[in-house]
Each structure stands twice: as structure tokens, then as C-alpha cells.
Image: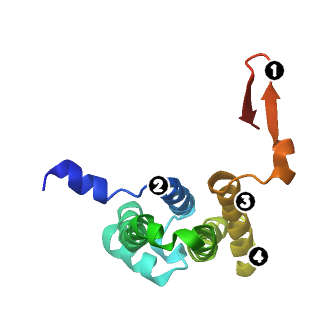
Amino acid sequence: MNFQSVIKHLTPKGVWLKRTALIFGFIFLDFLVTITFCRTPYMEANPYARSFMLIYGIVSGLALYDFLLAIPIYAILVFDSYMIKYTQHYKTKTEFIIDVALGWLIAGAHFNGAMSWLWDAPHFIRQAIGFMIYMAIAILSFYPVPKRLSCLIVEDLSKKTSRKV
């Protein structure tokens, strides 16, 4: 087995690659905001992240913590991208349920963590807003646009092609 075939099977297929990039975008937002505003490890509310920051330093400890946290998430996304073909009849429903779970548990939680440095609001509100942002991006990016929302598609008469706004 050569290196290219191994990499091919460790990369999510199709729309799952975009979904992975979106999830990791929320994780990276949390990472950037935390390293920007965290002056001492004791300012971090997450006890696990704080312990990594105490042992390895703020930036490297948080990077290691986020990397170790991202491995199972990435493995689930890769696994799902290859196994979704077996649920072809329920594919859209299954992907929507997975998006809801990822949106609340991963994107919402990391958005909550990032915004906790910037905005003094209840945890539930911050997590719900992160979930709504994730779902809005996911629905507009990963699912077909229904005919009712065709007003979002603008026709460019000069090139005789249509493009999304």
C-alpha cells in the first residue's frame, strides 16, 4: 500500500471535506481567540485545556489540546464520509442529523468558548448562536436550494450563466 492510497482513505470524501473544514474553522476560531486573550493558564475555564497550558505553555499546550481533541472528530468525519453511501435512501436525513450533532456539540461549544472571552452572555445563548451560525452555513453550503428560495439565485445576463449570491 503506497502513501497516496493511505492519504486518499484518510481524507473525507465529497461534501464531508467541506463539513470538516467548517468544523475545524470553529475550533480554530476558539484557538485564536483563546491565545489572543489568555494571559495566564489560570484564565482558561476548561480544566483539561488549562492543565495542558500549565504543562506545555499557553500556545503549545492549547495547540496540543485542540489537536488531540480534533483527532476523534476527524476520524468520525472520515468514517462517515465513506459509510454514508450505505444509507443512500436516508442520506439527506442522516447528514442533517449529523450536522445538528456537530453543530451543537462541536461548533456551538467552540463558539461558546471563543465568545466567552469577548461577550459576557449565558453559556446557552453563546452556544445556541454558534449552533445557528454553523447550521446556516451548512444548510446553504451542503444542501440543495429548494425552488422556493430560487430568489437567491441571480442570473447574469451578460454571460448567460447563473450564479449564487
- Label 2 packing within 10 angstroms: few (<14), some (14-19), many (20+): some
Callout 3, which amino acid? Answer: Ala
Quadrant the N terminus occupies: bottom left
Q: Name the residue under label 3.
A: 136
Mark found first going from the N terminus, 1 or 2: 2
- Label 1 packing within 10 angstroms: few (<14), some (14-19), many (20+): few
Mark found first going from the N terminus, 4 or 2: 2
List the single residue furthest toward the left.
1
* Gap in angstroms between the C-alphas marked 2 and 3: 17 Å
Q: Where is residue 63 in the image (x, y as percent from the top left)?
A: 39, 63
Q: Are marks 4 and 1 in contact (CB under 8 Å)?
A: no
Residue 17's mark?
2
* Gap in angstroms between the C-alphas marked 4 and 3: 16 Å
Image: 42 above or below 57: below
Q: Name the residue under label 1.
A: 157
Q: Mark 4 points at which residue?
A: 125
Please state which of the two labelled residues, at mark 4 or mark 1, is closer to the viewer. Answer: 1
Callout 1, which amino acid? Answer: Leu
Please state which of the two labelled residues, at mark 4 or mark 2, is closer to the viewer. Answer: 2
Looking at the picture, tell me which residue is in the foreground, 5 or 106.
5
Q: Position of residue 100 (x, y in %)?
A: 64, 74
